[in-house]
Image (cartoon, rainbow, N blue to C red):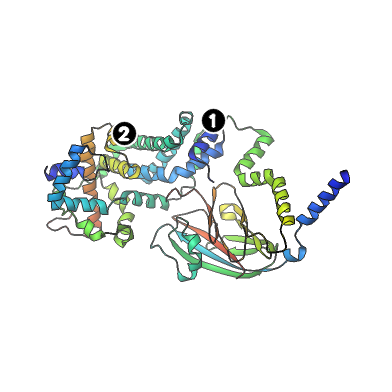
Amino acid sequence: MRCAGAAPLLGSLPGELDPTEEALLRAHLSTCPSCQARQADLQALSGLVQEGLLVEAARRDLSGLADGVMARIPASAWRGAPTGPIGQLLSFLRRHRILAAASALAPALAALALYLYIGRTAGPGPAGLAIEVTSEDLAAIVLETSDGPVILVGESSEGT
Amino acid sequence: MRSIWTAAWVAVVVLACPPARAADAPVQARIRVLQGFRQGTPGLPPGLDDLRAQLSATAYVRWEQAGEVQSAMQPKKPVSVPLPGGESVTVTLVESRPGAATFEVNAPASRTQSRVTVPPGKRIVQQVTPERGGSAWFVTIKAGG
Amino acid sequence: MAPSDIELVERARNGEPEAFRDLVVRHQRRVYAVALGIVKDRDLAWDVAQEVFVRVHQHLSECRDGAAFMTWLRRITARVAIDVLRKERPSRRSDVADVPEAVLREAAPGVLATALGTDPQETVLRRELSGRLTEALGQLPETHRAILVLREMDGLSYEELAERLSIPKGTVMSRLFHARKKMQVLLAGYAGIDAPGGGSP
Protein backbone atom coordinates (compact mmCIF):
# COMPACT_ATOMS: atom_id res chain seq x y z
CA MET A 1 0.00 0.00 0.00
CA ARG A 2 1.23 3.50 -0.91
CA CYS A 3 0.68 6.79 0.96
CA ALA A 4 -2.03 7.86 -1.49
CA GLY A 5 -4.07 4.81 -0.55
CA ALA A 6 -3.22 4.80 3.15
CA ALA A 7 -3.80 8.46 3.97
CA PRO A 8 -7.61 8.41 3.53
CA LEU A 9 -7.81 5.42 5.90
CA LEU A 10 -5.99 7.22 8.70
CA GLY A 11 -8.94 8.96 10.32
CA SER A 12 -11.07 5.83 10.62
CA LEU A 13 -12.87 4.93 13.83
CA PRO A 14 -11.89 1.69 15.59
CA GLY A 15 -13.42 -1.30 13.79
CA GLU A 16 -14.58 0.80 10.87
CA LEU A 17 -12.21 -0.60 8.26
CA ASP A 18 -12.57 -4.09 6.91
CA PRO A 19 -9.87 -6.54 8.12
CA THR A 20 -7.92 -6.39 4.85
CA GLU A 21 -7.78 -2.58 4.83
CA GLU A 22 -6.82 -2.59 8.47
CA ALA A 23 -3.95 -5.03 7.94
CA LEU A 24 -2.63 -3.09 4.93
CA LEU A 25 -2.80 0.18 6.82
CA ARG A 26 -1.01 -1.26 9.83
CA ALA A 27 1.76 -2.64 7.61
CA HIS A 28 2.13 0.67 5.81
CA LEU A 29 2.20 2.69 9.03
CA SER A 30 4.97 0.56 10.48
CA THR A 31 7.31 1.59 7.66
CA CYS A 32 6.14 5.10 6.67
CA PRO A 33 7.24 8.07 8.82
CA SER A 34 5.09 10.48 6.76
CA CYS A 35 1.90 8.61 7.46
CA GLN A 36 2.89 8.23 11.11
CA ALA A 37 3.20 12.02 11.21
CA ARG A 38 -0.19 12.44 9.49
CA GLN A 39 -1.68 10.11 12.06
CA ALA A 40 -0.14 12.25 14.83
CA ASP A 41 -1.65 15.41 13.30
CA LEU A 42 -5.08 13.81 13.27
CA GLN A 43 -4.73 12.77 16.89
CA ALA A 44 -3.51 16.20 17.95
CA LEU A 45 -6.52 17.87 16.33
CA SER A 46 -9.00 15.27 17.50
CA GLY A 47 -12.10 16.88 18.97
CA LEU A 48 -11.13 20.39 17.85
CA VAL A 49 -14.04 20.78 15.42
CA GLN A 50 -16.54 19.84 18.10
CA GLU A 51 -14.84 22.02 20.67
CA GLY A 52 -14.67 25.03 18.35
CA LEU A 53 -18.29 24.78 17.26
CA LEU A 54 -19.61 24.33 20.79
CA VAL A 55 -17.54 27.31 21.94
CA GLU A 56 -19.00 29.36 19.12
CA ALA A 57 -22.52 28.17 19.97
CA ALA A 58 -21.94 28.98 23.65
CA ARG A 59 -21.09 32.57 22.67
CA ARG A 60 -24.55 33.11 21.23
CA ASP A 61 -27.50 33.89 23.45
CA LEU A 62 -30.00 31.23 22.38
CA SER A 63 -32.69 32.22 24.86
CA GLY A 64 -35.08 33.33 22.10
CA LEU A 65 -34.72 30.22 19.96
CA ALA A 66 -37.27 28.12 21.83
CA ASP A 67 -39.77 31.01 21.74
CA GLY A 68 -39.43 31.12 17.95
CA VAL A 69 -40.02 27.38 17.70
CA MET A 70 -43.05 27.50 20.01
CA ALA A 71 -44.50 30.41 18.02
CA ARG A 72 -44.34 28.34 14.84
CA ILE A 73 -46.28 25.46 16.31
CA PRO A 74 -50.01 26.03 15.97
CA ALA A 75 -51.90 26.27 19.27
CA SER A 76 -54.18 23.47 18.09
CA ALA A 77 -51.17 21.13 18.36
CA TRP A 78 -51.52 21.29 22.11
CA ARG A 79 -54.82 19.45 22.08
CA GLY A 80 -54.34 18.08 25.56
CA ALA A 81 -53.97 21.55 27.05
CA PRO A 82 -57.23 22.67 28.68
CA THR A 83 -58.31 26.30 28.42
CA GLY A 84 -60.03 28.70 30.81
CA PRO A 85 -59.17 29.38 34.44
CA ILE A 86 -58.52 25.72 35.26
CA GLY A 87 -56.29 25.40 32.23
CA GLN A 88 -54.38 28.51 33.28
CA LEU A 89 -53.93 27.13 36.77
CA LEU A 90 -52.66 23.83 35.37
CA SER A 91 -50.35 25.70 33.05
CA PHE A 92 -49.01 27.73 36.00
CA LEU A 93 -48.44 24.56 37.98
CA ARG A 94 -46.63 22.99 35.03
CA ARG A 95 -44.33 25.98 34.82
CA HIS A 96 -43.70 25.85 38.56
CA ARG A 97 -43.47 22.14 39.06
CA ILE A 98 -41.48 22.38 42.24
CA LEU A 99 -44.18 24.56 43.79
CA ALA A 100 -46.86 22.24 42.51
CA ALA A 101 -45.11 19.19 43.91
CA ALA A 102 -44.49 21.00 47.18
CA SER A 103 -48.16 22.00 47.42
CA ALA A 104 -49.34 18.51 46.65
CA LEU A 105 -46.99 17.06 49.18
CA ALA A 106 -47.46 19.82 51.76
CA PRO A 107 -49.70 17.88 54.14
CA ALA A 108 -47.44 14.85 54.01
CA LEU A 109 -44.32 16.98 54.42
CA ALA A 110 -45.88 18.85 57.35
CA ALA A 111 -46.68 15.57 59.02
CA LEU A 112 -43.16 14.29 58.38
CA ALA A 113 -41.62 17.50 59.70
CA LEU A 114 -43.75 17.24 62.79
CA TYR A 115 -42.78 13.63 63.26
CA LEU A 116 -39.10 14.54 63.01
CA TYR A 117 -39.59 17.54 65.28
CA ILE A 118 -41.28 15.51 67.97
CA GLY A 119 -39.10 12.49 67.45
CA ARG A 120 -35.69 14.11 67.82
CA THR A 121 -34.12 14.88 71.13
CA ALA A 122 -32.65 18.30 71.91
CA GLY A 123 -29.91 19.19 69.43
CA PRO A 124 -29.12 21.16 66.29
CA GLY A 125 -31.54 21.51 63.41
CA PRO A 126 -31.57 19.22 60.42
CA ALA A 127 -28.28 19.20 58.56
CA GLY A 128 -29.86 18.40 55.19
CA LEU A 129 -30.57 21.01 52.55
CA ALA A 130 -34.05 22.17 51.63
CA ILE A 131 -34.20 23.74 48.20
CA GLU A 132 -37.11 25.28 46.39
CA VAL A 133 -36.56 27.05 43.09
CA THR A 134 -39.10 28.69 40.86
CA SER A 135 -38.34 30.24 37.52
CA GLU A 136 -40.85 31.93 35.27
CA ASP A 137 -39.51 30.94 31.91
CA LEU A 138 -36.08 29.43 32.30
CA ALA A 139 -35.29 25.89 33.29
CA ALA A 140 -33.73 25.83 36.75
CA ILE A 141 -31.23 23.14 37.60
CA VAL A 142 -29.88 22.38 41.06
CA LEU A 143 -26.47 20.73 41.36
CA GLU A 144 -25.76 19.41 44.81
CA THR A 145 -22.11 19.48 45.85
CA SER A 146 -20.35 18.65 49.08
CA ASP A 147 -20.07 22.38 49.84
CA GLY A 148 -23.68 23.32 49.10
CA PRO A 149 -26.10 23.72 46.24
CA VAL A 150 -25.44 25.37 42.87
CA ILE A 151 -28.55 26.74 41.20
CA LEU A 152 -28.28 27.30 37.47
CA VAL A 153 -30.80 28.72 35.07
CA GLY A 154 -31.04 28.09 31.36
CA GLU A 155 -30.63 24.86 29.53
CA SER A 156 -29.05 21.75 30.95
CA SER A 157 -25.40 21.61 29.97
CA GLU A 158 -25.31 18.35 28.14
CA GLY A 159 -21.57 18.11 28.31
CA THR A 160 -20.92 21.72 27.38
CA MET B 1 -62.92 11.14 70.22
CA ARG B 2 -63.42 14.55 68.68
CA SER B 3 -61.63 16.25 71.53
CA ILE B 4 -58.64 13.94 71.05
CA TRP B 5 -58.36 15.05 67.41
CA THR B 6 -58.71 18.69 68.38
CA ALA B 7 -55.99 18.31 70.97
CA ALA B 8 -53.81 16.54 68.44
CA TRP B 9 -54.21 19.37 65.93
CA VAL B 10 -53.45 21.98 68.58
CA ALA B 11 -50.32 20.01 69.47
CA VAL B 12 -49.39 19.87 65.78
CA VAL B 13 -49.76 23.61 65.37
CA VAL B 14 -47.89 24.43 68.56
CA LEU B 15 -45.05 22.00 67.93
CA ALA B 16 -44.70 22.88 64.27
CA CYS B 17 -44.02 26.53 65.10
CA PRO B 18 -40.31 26.98 65.86
CA PRO B 19 -39.43 28.93 69.01
CA ALA B 20 -39.69 32.67 68.27
CA ARG B 21 -36.40 33.57 69.88
CA ALA B 22 -34.35 31.23 67.68
CA ALA B 23 -36.12 32.36 64.52
CA ASP B 24 -35.28 35.99 65.20
CA ALA B 25 -31.54 35.54 65.56
CA PRO B 26 -29.50 37.65 63.12
CA VAL B 27 -27.06 35.83 60.86
CA GLN B 28 -23.71 37.10 59.70
CA ALA B 29 -23.71 36.49 55.96
CA ARG B 30 -21.11 36.96 53.25
CA ILE B 31 -22.58 37.57 49.81
CA ARG B 32 -20.27 37.72 46.81
CA VAL B 33 -21.11 38.65 43.23
CA LEU B 34 -19.28 36.57 40.62
CA GLN B 35 -19.09 36.48 36.87
CA GLY B 36 -18.57 33.12 35.20
CA PHE B 37 -17.23 32.76 31.66
CA ARG B 38 -17.55 29.74 29.41
CA GLN B 39 -14.29 30.58 27.73
CA GLY B 40 -10.83 31.68 28.68
CA THR B 41 -7.99 30.34 30.70
CA PRO B 42 -9.64 28.04 33.25
CA GLY B 43 -9.04 29.15 36.79
CA LEU B 44 -10.22 30.71 40.00
CA PRO B 45 -8.78 33.83 41.60
CA PRO B 46 -7.26 32.99 45.03
CA GLY B 47 -10.18 34.68 46.81
CA LEU B 48 -12.62 32.19 45.35
CA ASP B 49 -10.72 29.07 46.23
CA ASP B 50 -13.25 28.14 48.92
CA LEU B 51 -15.87 27.85 46.16
CA ARG B 52 -13.87 25.47 43.99
CA ALA B 53 -16.08 22.41 44.57
CA GLN B 54 -19.22 24.30 43.60
CA LEU B 55 -17.90 26.43 40.74
CA SER B 56 -16.12 23.54 39.09
CA ALA B 57 -19.42 21.67 38.92
CA THR B 58 -20.64 24.16 36.30
CA ALA B 59 -19.75 24.57 32.62
CA TYR B 60 -18.17 27.97 33.31
CA VAL B 61 -14.40 27.80 33.26
CA ARG B 62 -13.17 31.25 34.30
CA TRP B 63 -14.40 33.23 37.29
CA GLU B 64 -14.08 36.77 38.55
CA GLN B 65 -15.43 38.39 41.68
CA ALA B 66 -17.18 41.71 41.05
CA GLY B 67 -18.47 42.66 44.49
CA GLU B 68 -19.07 41.62 48.05
CA VAL B 69 -21.54 42.47 50.81
CA GLN B 70 -21.04 41.42 54.42
CA SER B 71 -24.08 41.86 56.52
CA ALA B 72 -25.56 40.89 59.88
CA MET B 73 -28.84 39.87 58.32
CA GLN B 74 -32.08 40.21 60.22
CA PRO B 75 -34.91 37.84 59.40
CA LYS B 76 -37.35 39.20 56.81
CA LYS B 77 -35.13 42.25 56.09
CA PRO B 78 -34.08 42.05 52.41
CA VAL B 79 -30.55 43.01 51.43
CA SER B 80 -30.16 44.37 47.92
CA VAL B 81 -26.99 43.29 46.15
CA PRO B 82 -26.13 45.37 43.07
CA LEU B 83 -24.94 43.67 39.90
CA PRO B 84 -22.72 45.50 37.42
CA GLY B 85 -25.00 46.93 34.73
CA GLY B 86 -27.63 48.34 37.05
CA GLU B 87 -29.57 45.21 37.93
CA SER B 88 -29.74 43.88 41.45
CA VAL B 89 -30.54 40.77 43.41
CA THR B 90 -32.44 40.66 46.68
CA VAL B 91 -31.33 38.30 49.40
CA THR B 92 -33.60 37.78 52.39
CA LEU B 93 -32.93 35.77 55.50
CA VAL B 94 -36.24 34.00 55.93
CA GLU B 95 -35.41 32.15 59.08
CA SER B 96 -32.43 31.25 61.21
CA ARG B 97 -32.11 28.42 63.66
CA PRO B 98 -29.07 27.03 65.47
CA GLY B 99 -28.49 24.36 62.84
CA ALA B 100 -29.64 26.08 59.66
CA ALA B 101 -30.48 29.34 57.96
CA THR B 102 -33.02 29.76 55.19
CA PHE B 103 -32.36 32.37 52.51
CA GLU B 104 -34.55 33.57 49.74
CA VAL B 105 -32.84 34.91 46.61
CA ASN B 106 -34.89 36.92 44.17
CA ALA B 107 -33.25 37.52 40.82
CA PRO B 108 -35.51 39.65 38.60
CA ALA B 109 -33.10 39.45 35.63
CA SER B 110 -33.64 35.71 35.33
CA ARG B 111 -37.12 35.84 36.88
CA THR B 112 -35.93 33.20 39.29
CA GLN B 113 -36.61 32.87 42.97
CA SER B 114 -35.10 30.35 45.31
CA ARG B 115 -35.54 29.46 48.93
CA VAL B 116 -32.70 27.39 50.28
CA THR B 117 -31.96 26.12 53.77
CA VAL B 118 -28.28 25.57 54.48
CA PRO B 119 -26.37 24.54 57.58
CA PRO B 120 -23.56 26.83 58.78
CA GLY B 121 -20.41 26.58 56.69
CA LYS B 122 -22.22 25.59 53.47
CA ARG B 123 -22.63 28.04 50.64
CA ILE B 124 -25.34 28.70 48.11
CA VAL B 125 -24.21 29.50 44.57
CA GLN B 126 -26.98 30.81 42.36
CA GLN B 127 -26.97 32.01 38.77
CA VAL B 128 -28.89 35.27 38.75
CA THR B 129 -28.85 36.28 35.08
CA PRO B 130 -29.37 34.20 31.96
CA GLU B 131 -26.22 33.51 30.01
CA ARG B 132 -25.34 36.26 27.55
CA GLY B 133 -22.34 36.23 25.26
CA GLY B 134 -20.82 33.25 27.03
CA SER B 135 -20.99 34.67 30.54
CA ALA B 136 -23.46 34.94 33.39
CA TRP B 137 -23.70 36.52 36.83
CA PHE B 138 -23.87 34.57 40.05
CA VAL B 139 -24.21 35.30 43.75
CA THR B 140 -22.85 33.14 46.48
CA ILE B 141 -24.07 33.28 50.06
CA LYS B 142 -22.34 31.90 53.09
CA ALA B 143 -23.97 32.06 56.46
CA GLY B 144 -21.89 32.51 59.56
CA GLY B 145 -18.89 34.34 58.21
CA MET C 1 -33.75 13.97 38.56
CA ALA C 2 -34.30 15.67 35.21
CA PRO C 3 -36.85 13.93 32.99
CA SER C 4 -35.40 11.85 30.17
CA ASP C 5 -35.80 12.84 26.52
CA ILE C 6 -38.42 10.19 25.97
CA GLU C 7 -40.43 11.36 29.00
CA LEU C 8 -40.43 14.88 27.56
CA VAL C 9 -41.37 13.52 24.12
CA GLU C 10 -44.22 11.57 25.71
CA ARG C 11 -45.53 14.59 27.61
CA ALA C 12 -45.20 16.86 24.57
CA ARG C 13 -47.14 14.30 22.56
CA ASN C 14 -49.86 14.45 25.20
CA GLY C 15 -50.21 18.18 24.62
CA GLU C 16 -47.82 19.72 27.15
CA PRO C 17 -46.11 22.65 25.43
CA GLU C 18 -43.71 23.16 28.36
CA ALA C 19 -42.34 19.64 27.93
CA PHE C 20 -41.59 20.37 24.29
CA ARG C 21 -39.99 23.69 25.19
CA ASP C 22 -37.76 21.87 27.72
CA LEU C 23 -36.74 19.46 24.98
CA VAL C 24 -35.82 22.35 22.66
CA VAL C 25 -33.86 24.15 25.37
CA ARG C 26 -32.03 20.95 26.26
CA HIS C 27 -30.78 20.29 22.73
CA GLN C 28 -30.75 23.69 21.02
CA ARG C 29 -27.09 24.49 21.59
CA ARG C 30 -25.83 21.30 20.00
CA VAL C 31 -28.26 21.54 17.09
CA TYR C 32 -27.23 25.16 16.53
CA ALA C 33 -23.53 24.18 16.66
CA VAL C 34 -23.96 21.46 14.02
CA ALA C 35 -26.06 23.76 11.85
CA LEU C 36 -23.47 26.53 12.16
CA GLY C 37 -20.71 24.13 11.17
CA ILE C 38 -22.57 23.11 8.04
CA VAL C 39 -24.16 26.36 6.86
CA LYS C 40 -21.49 28.63 8.43
CA ASP C 41 -23.82 31.64 8.61
CA ARG C 42 -25.02 32.40 12.16
CA ASP C 43 -28.48 33.62 11.22
CA LEU C 44 -29.00 30.76 8.81
CA ALA C 45 -27.90 28.35 11.56
CA TRP C 46 -30.51 29.90 13.87
CA ASP C 47 -33.20 29.33 11.21
CA VAL C 48 -32.00 25.77 10.67
CA ALA C 49 -32.15 25.04 14.41
CA GLN C 50 -35.72 26.36 14.62
CA GLU C 51 -36.79 24.41 11.55
CA VAL C 52 -35.26 21.24 13.02
CA PHE C 53 -37.36 21.52 16.17
CA VAL C 54 -40.53 22.37 14.24
CA ARG C 55 -40.00 19.18 12.20
CA VAL C 56 -39.28 17.22 15.36
CA HIS C 57 -42.63 18.39 16.70
CA GLN C 58 -44.43 17.45 13.49
CA HIS C 59 -43.13 13.89 13.79
CA LEU C 60 -43.25 13.44 17.55
CA SER C 61 -45.72 10.60 17.26
CA GLU C 62 -43.13 8.57 15.36
CA CYS C 63 -40.57 8.68 18.15
CA ARG C 64 -41.09 5.88 20.64
CA ASP C 65 -37.59 5.17 21.85
CA GLY C 66 -35.37 7.41 23.99
CA ALA C 67 -32.10 6.13 22.53
CA ALA C 68 -33.43 6.69 19.03
CA PHE C 69 -34.38 10.29 19.81
CA MET C 70 -30.82 11.62 19.58
CA THR C 71 -30.14 9.70 16.37
CA TRP C 72 -33.36 11.03 14.93
CA LEU C 73 -32.62 14.61 16.03
CA ARG C 74 -29.16 14.40 14.46
CA ARG C 75 -30.61 13.01 11.25
CA ILE C 76 -33.12 15.85 10.98
CA THR C 77 -30.44 18.43 11.77
CA ALA C 78 -28.16 17.11 9.04
CA ARG C 79 -31.05 16.91 6.56
CA VAL C 80 -32.32 20.44 7.19
CA ALA C 81 -28.84 21.99 7.20
CA ILE C 82 -27.81 20.26 3.97
CA ASP C 83 -31.11 21.19 2.29
CA VAL C 84 -30.63 24.82 3.27
CA LEU C 85 -27.09 24.70 1.95
CA ARG C 86 -28.29 23.36 -1.39
CA LYS C 87 -30.91 26.07 -1.61
CA GLU C 88 -28.39 28.75 -0.73
CA ARG C 89 -25.63 27.39 -2.92
CA PRO C 90 -25.83 29.72 -5.96
CA SER C 91 -25.33 32.87 -3.91
CA ARG C 92 -22.76 31.41 -1.57
CA ARG C 93 -20.46 29.51 -3.83
CA SER C 94 -18.25 32.47 -4.65
CA ASP C 95 -17.13 33.03 -1.07
CA VAL C 96 -15.65 29.57 -0.70
CA ALA C 97 -11.89 29.89 -0.83
CA ASP C 98 -10.35 26.64 -1.92
CA VAL C 99 -6.90 25.75 -0.66
CA PRO C 100 -4.60 25.05 -3.60
CA GLU C 101 -3.73 21.41 -4.04
CA ALA C 102 -0.08 22.37 -4.34
CA VAL C 103 -0.12 23.62 -0.77
CA LEU C 104 -1.55 20.32 0.39
CA ARG C 105 1.32 18.49 -1.19
CA GLU C 106 3.85 20.86 0.30
CA ALA C 107 2.51 21.01 3.84
CA ALA C 108 4.73 18.94 6.07
CA PRO C 109 2.85 16.26 7.97
CA GLY C 110 3.35 16.22 11.72
CA VAL C 111 3.97 19.94 12.29
CA LEU C 112 0.66 20.50 14.06
CA ALA C 113 1.18 17.47 16.24
CA THR C 114 4.59 18.83 17.22
CA ALA C 115 3.24 22.32 17.89
CA LEU C 116 0.26 21.13 19.89
CA GLY C 117 2.28 18.66 21.96
CA THR C 118 1.13 15.46 23.53
CA ASP C 119 -1.41 16.97 25.94
CA PRO C 120 -3.58 18.95 23.53
CA GLN C 121 -6.32 19.76 26.04
CA GLU C 122 -4.03 22.08 27.94
CA THR C 123 -2.22 24.11 25.33
CA VAL C 124 -2.86 27.78 24.71
CA LEU C 125 -2.42 27.15 20.99
CA ARG C 126 -5.25 24.63 20.99
CA ARG C 127 -7.60 27.12 22.63
CA GLU C 128 -6.59 29.75 20.12
CA LEU C 129 -7.21 27.39 17.22
CA SER C 130 -10.52 26.29 18.72
CA GLY C 131 -11.54 29.98 18.80
CA ARG C 132 -10.85 30.29 15.08
CA LEU C 133 -12.38 26.98 14.12
CA THR C 134 -15.54 28.36 12.55
CA GLU C 135 -13.45 30.79 10.52
CA ALA C 136 -11.41 27.86 9.21
CA LEU C 137 -14.52 25.78 8.54
CA GLY C 138 -15.94 28.70 6.58
CA GLN C 139 -12.99 28.47 4.19
CA LEU C 140 -13.80 24.89 3.22
CA PRO C 141 -15.99 23.99 0.26
CA GLU C 142 -19.47 23.16 1.51
CA THR C 143 -19.23 19.45 0.70
CA HIS C 144 -16.11 19.15 2.82
CA ARG C 145 -17.59 21.23 5.61
CA ALA C 146 -20.73 19.13 5.92
CA ILE C 147 -18.90 15.82 5.94
CA LEU C 148 -16.32 16.98 8.49
CA VAL C 149 -18.93 18.45 10.83
CA LEU C 150 -21.16 15.38 10.72
CA ARG C 151 -18.19 13.10 11.33
CA GLU C 152 -16.74 15.16 14.18
CA MET C 153 -19.93 16.30 15.90
CA ASP C 154 -22.08 13.22 15.51
CA GLY C 155 -19.38 10.56 15.14
CA LEU C 156 -21.07 9.10 12.06
CA SER C 157 -19.39 6.10 10.46
CA TYR C 158 -18.34 6.03 6.81
CA GLU C 159 -21.45 4.00 6.00
CA GLU C 160 -23.76 6.38 7.83
CA LEU C 161 -22.16 9.38 6.12
CA ALA C 162 -22.51 7.66 2.76
CA GLU C 163 -26.19 7.07 3.43
CA ARG C 164 -26.84 10.54 4.84
CA LEU C 165 -25.09 12.32 1.97
CA SER C 166 -26.09 9.85 -0.76
CA ILE C 167 -22.51 9.29 -1.92
CA PRO C 168 -20.37 6.13 -2.11
CA LYS C 169 -18.28 5.13 0.90
CA GLY C 170 -15.04 5.66 -1.05
CA THR C 171 -16.07 9.24 -1.79
CA VAL C 172 -16.82 9.78 1.91
CA MET C 173 -13.30 8.66 2.80
CA SER C 174 -11.53 10.77 0.24
CA ARG C 175 -13.66 13.85 0.99
CA LEU C 176 -12.99 13.49 4.66
CA PHE C 177 -9.29 13.21 4.01
CA HIS C 178 -9.25 16.35 1.89
CA ALA C 179 -11.43 18.25 4.37
CA ARG C 180 -9.08 17.38 7.22
CA LYS C 181 -6.02 18.20 5.21
CA LYS C 182 -7.38 21.62 4.30
CA MET C 183 -8.30 22.28 7.91
CA GLN C 184 -4.79 21.37 8.97
CA VAL C 185 -3.24 23.73 6.44
CA LEU C 186 -5.54 26.57 7.52
CA LEU C 187 -4.99 25.95 11.22
CA ALA C 188 -1.22 25.72 10.70
CA GLY C 189 -1.46 29.09 8.98
CA TYR C 190 -3.40 30.59 11.92
CA ALA C 191 -0.84 29.15 14.29
CA GLY C 192 1.95 30.79 12.31
CA ILE C 193 3.56 27.43 11.65
CA ASP C 194 5.75 27.36 8.59
CA ALA C 195 5.65 23.97 7.03
CA PRO C 196 9.18 23.16 5.88
CA GLY C 197 9.33 23.49 2.15
CA GLY C 198 5.73 24.73 2.05
CA GLY C 199 4.30 27.96 0.79
CA SER C 200 1.58 29.89 2.55
CA PRO C 201 -1.99 29.38 1.37
B139 versus C98 height, above or below: below
Residue at image point 72% right, 61% down? A121
Q: Is residue C129 left or right of residue A4?
A: right
Q: What type is the residue that disc 1 sits on?
A: Ala
Residue B68 vs residue C41, the one in the foreground: B68
Q: Quadrant of the C terminus of chain B?
A: bottom right
Residue C28, percent across and down?
44, 43
- Residue A7 shows which numbered tag? none
- Position of C125 with respect to A72 (left or right) is left
Is the residue marked by circle 2 packed among few (<14), some (14-19), or many (20+) residues within 10 Å? some
Q: Is residue B122 left or right of residue A105?
A: left
Few, some or many C-alpha atoms within 10 Å of disc 1 (few <14, some 14-19, many ≥20)?
Answer: some
Q: Subunit of mark 1?
A: A
- Residue A37: percent from left, percent from top: 18, 53
| Observer-nearest of C52 and A109 | A109
Residue at the image position 88 percent from the left and 46 percent from the top:
B3
Q: Is residue C49 above or below residue B104?
A: above
Q: Does residue C51 appear in this view?
A: no
Q: Is residue A139 left or right of residue C118?
A: right
Q: Which residue is mark 2?
A: C164
- Do dots 2 and 1 share one subunit? no
Picture quadrant where residue B80 is located: bottom right
Q: Report helix, strand or loop for mark 2.
A: helix
Output the chain of dot 2: C
In this figure, which residue is indicated by the disc labeled 1? A77
Q: At label 2, which amino acid type do we have?
A: Arg
Q: Secondary structure at mark 1?
A: helix
